[in-house]
Image: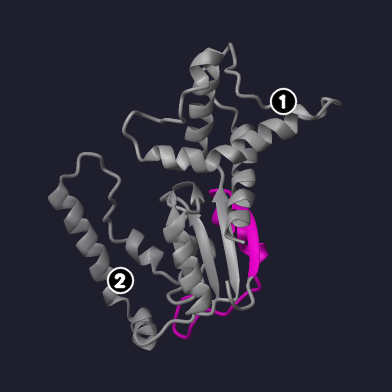
Amino acid sequence: FPGSLRTVACRSSLAPAALVRHFTAVPPPHNIDPKDPFGVKILSQDSISMQDAALTHEELRDRMEKGNAVFQANESMKSLRRKLSGSQHPAVTVLTCSDSRVPAEILFNRSLGELFVIRTAGNVVEDSVLGSIEFAVSVLKTPALLVLGHEKCGAVHATISTLREKHSRRREEREHDALRVSETSYLDAIVRNISPAVYDVVYDHSKDEAGTRTKFTLERPAHAPNTVDPAFVSECVVSNVMHQAESIL
């Protein structure tokens, strides 16, 4: 991509404070609470939780509308919204996971206009993601790109489980078998994208002849065939972040 672009690849835990050290502190916009730039405290006090599985579509829509009303009524945000209505100049482009527990703006305590965020399951890179990054770099002139993974990533876990299932079949069946989550699943594309990162971790651990690290393989543990070691997932998350960053550059 044209222009000067600095790339950072890192992993987040589900605790928001985990990645603050990677960025130089930037003062929040004027009139914005530096401890709560997105008014999360205000929203949480409004008792509009959407995590009740029994909610109807109408109730979910009502809660969304109420949440937006709270946001629009936030006086500290109104001047910033007016200022940003004509243009945007985000400082960092962030490619991160769609997981609802890791919103980049809240993780880094940033407000409107500061981050250009692209979210996909497993923070995978495909054509529309590359187009979004090119727009951010070429048009918006963001000087830095962050590829952000996180612990307990469901997309990475699903990829490991799918590869194990394929590995457990007889060799002659595997040779002609595509990587599939199901017969008609768009999730297959995510699994295929993340698979090289998982294979790299397995291969890297297979070379540890000294036995100083836990051996991660695609063999199902006999004592718990349907479980995946969290440490295995974590290493694959790191590997996947590096793979996706390399595919961008």
Mark drawn on residue 215 = 1
Q: Residue furthest left?
A: 58
- Crowd class of label 2 (few under 14; some 14 to 19; many from 20; radius 10 Å): some
Asked if the magenta segment contains residue 15, the reply would be yes
Mark drawn on residue 104 = none
Residue found 51% across the figure and 20% down from its top? 174
Instruction: Answer above or below: position of 228 versus 89.
Output: above
| Colour pattern | one colour
Q: Which residues are magenta?
A: 6-33
Residue found 81% across the figure and 29% down from its top? 208
Q: Nearer the viewer, residue 134 or 212?
A: 134
How much space separates mark 2 and mark 1, taking CA atoms?
49 Å
Q: Which callout, 2 or 1, points at the residue further toward the start of the chain? A: 2
Q: Nearer the viewer, residue 246 or 13?
A: 246
Asked if the magenta segment contains residue 110, the reply would be no
Residue found 65% across the figure and 39% down from its top? 235
Amino acid found under the numbered disc labelled 1: Lys
Amino acid found under the numbered disc labelled 2: Phe
- On-image quarter of the N terminus: bottom right
Instruction: Answer above or below: position of 18 versus 114.
Output: above
User: Can residue 18 be seen by looking at this rendering?
Assistant: no
Tell whether 16 sits left or right of 36.
right
Q: Position of residue 90 (x, y in %)?
A: 50, 77
Instruction: Answer above or below: position of 10 versus 34.
Output: above
Q: Nearer the viewer, mark 2 or mark 1?
A: 1
Query: Which residue is labeled 2 in the image?
Result: 71
Q: Position of residue 221 (x, y in %)?
A: 59, 16
- On-image quarter of the C terminus: bottom right
